[in-house]
């Protein structure tokens, strides 16, 4: 396994401006992800995990800081090439599965390949079936998303993310809409994919799921912190919220 950085983030900040309110969603984030690693990012709701993942997946841009993907600084890449890189290098899995309801399982998984030049119909079919076999869903090619359980829909979404053989799989709360049995099955699937060589970055507010990863990163209030600090700050926040509003002191 290579130890080269696939992703390098340096001082990443993200400020959202809405109705005169500034939200500092990311307040200076640094970390690396090497090829073949399985990293989890955990922290309480609102700490900036989805914002960070959207930046990693080239769905959004940072307000400040540098992001180097595969040795290239992302800020230097124009819009059309970004779309190309997103299609080829990034596989995204969302909490709400985000399958297209009027496409079959097969068509959902095939979709990313249809945006690529030079992939023949026969190759698309072979790769789509292979991706569905990897997630144990090849027996449901003709079904529609609404005919599947949540756990099955998420397996199909993972197949769709994998079909293009991306450099990295980004998963945002992939178990968030699943019961614990299906949640664990999806986690086991990610673990198998990692063992077979995939690079994975998975975001969760649930520290139990974070433990499935090879390396854990913790966030609080838009920053990366160590585990003990995250638990301490989380505890302090819970204590503060337990007090009557009149006695609360802003942090
Ligand atoms: N598009 C947006 N516009 C304004 N504020 C946003 C936007 N997206 C996220 N935020 C704010 O940024 C912070 C981090 O959000 P998010 O990254 O979704 O957190 P998490 O995924 O950890 O729950 C929150 O305070 C959220 O309200
Ligand atoms: Mg989120």
Image (cartoon, helix red, strand yellow):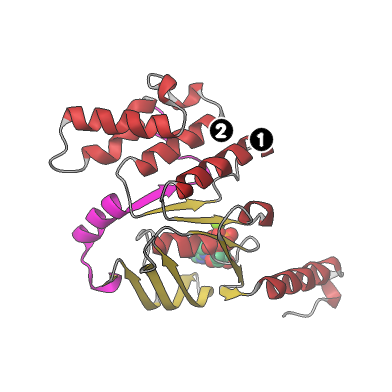
Residue neighbourhood size for the residue with mark 2, other residues' Cα within 10 Å, grouped as few (<14), some (14–19), many (≥20): many
- Image spot of residue 225 (x, y percent): 61, 75
Q: Quadrant of residue 118?
A: top left
Q: Residue at x 63, y 64 (%)?
A: 43
For the residues labelled 2 and 1, the Cα–Cα distance comes to 9 Å
**Residue 167 in the image: above or below residue 23:** above
Q: Can you say which quadrant of the picture contains the N terminus?
A: bottom left
Q: Is residue 66 shown left or right of residue 194?
A: left
- Image spot of residue 129 (x, y percent): 33, 28
Asked if the residues shown at circle 2 and circle 1 are in contact, with their CB atoms under 8 angstroms apart, the answer is: yes
Q: Which mark is residue 181?
A: 1
In terms of secondary structure, where does tag 1 sit? Answer: helix
| Residue 102 shows in this picture | no
Q: Which residue is mark 2?
A: 151
Q: Is residue 96 shown left or right of residue 143?
A: right
**Residue 222 in the image: above or below residue 123:** below
Foreground pick, 245 / 57: 57
The residue range painted magenta reads: 74-103
């Amino acid at each position: 396994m290579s130890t080269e950085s696939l992703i390098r983030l340096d001082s990443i900040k993200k400020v959202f401006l809405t109705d005169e309110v500034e939200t500092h969603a990311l307040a200076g984030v640094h970390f690396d992800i090497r090829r073949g690693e399985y990293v989890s990012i955990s922290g309480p709701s609102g700490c900036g995990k989805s914002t960070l993942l959207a930046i990693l997946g080239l769905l959004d841009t940072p307000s400040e800081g540098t992001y180097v993907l595969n040795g290239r600084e992302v800020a230097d890449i124009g819009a059309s090439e970004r779309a190309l890189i997103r299609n080829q290098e990034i596989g995204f899995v969302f909490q709400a599965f985000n399958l297209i309801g009027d496409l079959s399982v097969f068509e959902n998984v095939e979709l990313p390949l249809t945006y690529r030049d030079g992939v023949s119909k026969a190759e698309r079919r072979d790769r789509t079936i292979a991706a569905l076999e990897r997630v144990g869903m090849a027996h449901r090619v003709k079904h529609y998303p609404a005919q599947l359980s949540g756990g099955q829909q998420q397996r199909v979404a993972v197949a769709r993310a994998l079909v293009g053989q991306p450099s990295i799989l980004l998963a945002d709360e992939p178990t968030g809409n699943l019961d614990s049995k299906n949640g664990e099955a999806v986690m086991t699937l990610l673990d198998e994919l990692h063992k077979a060589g995939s690079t994975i970055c998975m975001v969760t507010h649930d520290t139990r799921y974070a433990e499935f990863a090879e390396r854990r990163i913790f966030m609080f209030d838009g920053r990366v912190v160590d585990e003990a600090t995250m638990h301490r700050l989380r505890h302090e926040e819970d204590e503060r919220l337990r007090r009557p509003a009149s006695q609360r002191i802003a942090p």
